[in-house]
Image: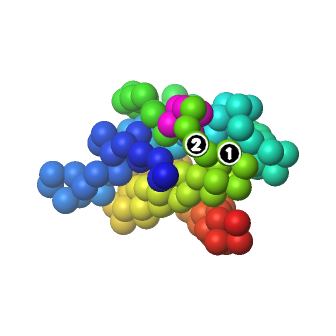
Amino acid sequence: MFISTAALADNTGEQRPDGRAPTATDVISGLYAFSRFQQGLLESTDLKGNAEVKNLAALRAEEAAKRDKTLKEIQAAIGAEPHVGKTAAGASLAEPDSSEGPAYIRTFYAAQIPEYETAITLLERYLKGPDNATLAAFAREQLPVLRAQVRDAERTMADK
């Protein structure tokens, strides 16, 4: 019932072979992939979601768009060329399966937790050896927001 998190595993959340912190390009790529996941949640709620998950998905997609706008500015300033792959997580939520009603809602929240954890871990690792002050400041700003959102998802899932 849990959704695949292969979307970020390509090279953004993985440990670098030399053990060093991820680069600015790795972080930007990982956050773009996380944003695509959040957009995918919005698309999946159109098919199965109730008002609660639709509203939350719309809010998270809006936050992702704002985050992407800031990332594009940072990307342009530092000349980073992010490597953006496809994400399958949103598509997996939208696939026809036996999840309806409460089961879909649990799946909706459960899908978010590993994605948030991957993004949070990526930012934490980047902040151990950042290569760009602007992106480091952005990462420090995003961490508490992402941590609060994953806690909310965990609490809500536990309540369902």
Q: Residue furthest left?
A: 18
Q: Is residue 93 magenta?
A: yes
The three-letter amino acid code for the residue at tag 2 is: Ser
Query: What residue is at 59 percent from the left and 52 percent from the top?
Result: 107
Query: What residue is at 61 percent from the left and 68 percent from the top?
Result: 154
Q: Residue furthest right?
A: 51
Q: Pick whichever, 71 or 12, lies toward us.
A: 12
Marks 1 and 2 sit apart, C-alpha to C-alpha, by 6 Å
17 vs 76: above or below:
below
Q: Pick whichever, 128 or 33, lies toward us.
A: 33
7 vs 160: above or below:
above
Give left or right: position of 47 versus 80: right
Q: Residue 145, can we see it?
A: no
Q: Position of residue 102 (x, y in %)?
A: 70, 55
Quarter holding residue 67: top right
Give the secondary structure at mark 2: loop
Q: Position of residue 90 (x, y in %)?
A: 55, 36
| Colour logic | rainbow
Q: Position of residue 10 (x, y in %)?
A: 31, 40
Q: Which residue is mark 2?
A: 98
Q: Residue 140, can we see it?
A: yes
Q: Residues within 10 Å of mark 1 (few under 14, many from 20)?
A: some
What is the chief secondary structure element of the magenta stretch? helix
Q: Are dots 1 and 2 in contact, CB under 8 Å?
A: yes
Query: What residue is at 49 percent from the left and 52 percent from the top?
Result: 1
In the rendering, which numbered label is found on residue 57? none
Give the secondary structure at mark 1: loop
The three-letter amino acid code for the residue at tag 1 is: Glu
**Magenta-tinted stretch:** 91-95
Q: Is residue 138 magenta?
A: no
Q: Which residue is mark 1?
A: 100
Q: Position of residue 81 (x, y in %)?
A: 39, 28
